[in-house]
Amino acid sequence: MAGIQMKNIVKKYGDGFPAVNDVSIDIADGEFVILVGPSGCGKSTLLRMIVGLEDITSGDMVIGEKRVNDLAPRDRNLAMVFQNYALYPHLTVYENIAFPLRLAGASDADVDAKVREASATLELDEHLDRKPGNLSGGQRQRVAMGRAIVRDADAFLFDEPLSNLDAKLRGQMRTEIARLQKKLGITTVYVTHDQTEAMTLGDRVAVLKRGVLQQLASPRELYENPGNLFVAGFIGSPPMNFLPAEVDGTKVQLPFGTVEIPADRAEKVAGRGLLIAGIRPGAFEDASLVDEAKAPTGSTFRAKVEVVEWLGNETYAYLPFEAPPEVQKQLEQLEKDLDGDQLRTQLVISLDGASRVREGDEAEIWVDTSQMHLFDPATGENLTVDRTRAGRIPELDGPATRTTA
């Protein structure tokens, strides 16, 4: 096993377009790191540069303290699992798993021992004599993982391995991959566009946009302390609400009324003028259901509810609002960056299922203002981010890597 260091990695194609632009990530030995972002963000290209399937335009790729830029894929001792399984249809499950061992000239005894160990780990024993065409999608993916396990590789690389599976199988395979990685303790880099996979699997998550690293942090840190509008909008389901906001001291004027924010956050945005407030749906509650001890920690406002969706244990309520041109322009750009995920000018709030709020009601809503983020409309930078908890945010780490949202 080995750690992986990406130092100022750049990949440019013939037209000069930077598919990956000055990305630096240190992955510790045994760490599980996710590369996530919308289509075209450079995540798969970066993974292919790690394994050697793409040339590196500039920068250094270091695996186990050895620079590997000029090494062929077969000399890097990495195991890769692809989206399409890449199994040999004419070979049995046993022989598919054994293939890299036979290619390396391992003895029959070693092949058998390693295949059966991997098969037991992945619960494939009863399928060893079957052909891939007779297996389910989840079973095929386990065979592909078994072929990776037997190689005793320095690291596992996964390129959207669950994309071809239905929702139920994806959930099952996520659990299996997480369990397997913890059991083997092997360095793992996993590419996905699915934020659920990113949030549930990784020790740390690298969020990419247009080839540029936006933030590198644990899933919780990304959720609670997004570095910019793009990360805030990409991470979380339902997505974060973005509202026009005017700050006056410790008060913030939102479309629905004025709320108080903590003094430390107010200090960071003093004199900034029009900002974008970001508040996750879960930060709201029906004011009538908020505990008396908790109520003073937030603010309440009244607003008309347009649509209500009751789901049993929770209720989603939708409250429309107007946004000024400066804010609307940034939200429209963010919508494009997020592969067209629609960011409507409406507030989405998650209430307890016991709430009796109904469509058309003028409801009293409570909001935990300690969870409110304030963003610069021009750059998308989170002005209130807690830098001690937010992991690595390249655009705030120095002018050499500065980007805007």
Image: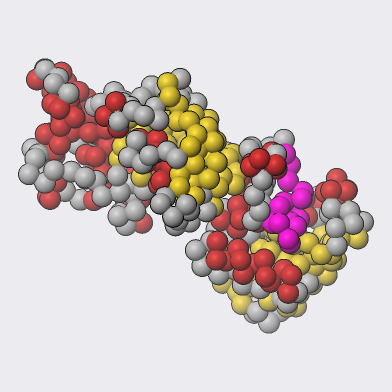
Identified at 78% across, 62% down, the residue is 275
Q: Is residue 194 visible?
A: no
**Which of the 4 image quadrants contains residue 217?**
top right
Percent x, y of residue 89: 11, 46
Q: Which residues are magenta?
A: 372-387
Identified at 49% across, 50% down, the residue is 18
Q: Is residue 381 magenta?
A: yes
Residue situated furthest bottom in the rendering: 360
Q: Is residue 174 magenta?
A: no
54 or 176, which lies in front? 54
Against 331, is 191 above or below?
Answer: above
Against 109, is 327 above or below?
Answer: below
Q: Quadrant of the N terminus?
A: top left
Identified at 45% across, 30% down, the residue is 61
Q: Is residue 267 left or right of residue 336?
A: right
Main SS, magenta residues: loop
Colour theme? secondary structure
Percent x, y of residue 356: 66, 71
Q: Quadrant of the C terminus?
A: bottom right
Residue situated furthest right in the rendering: 249
Identified at 68% across, 82% down, the residue is 360
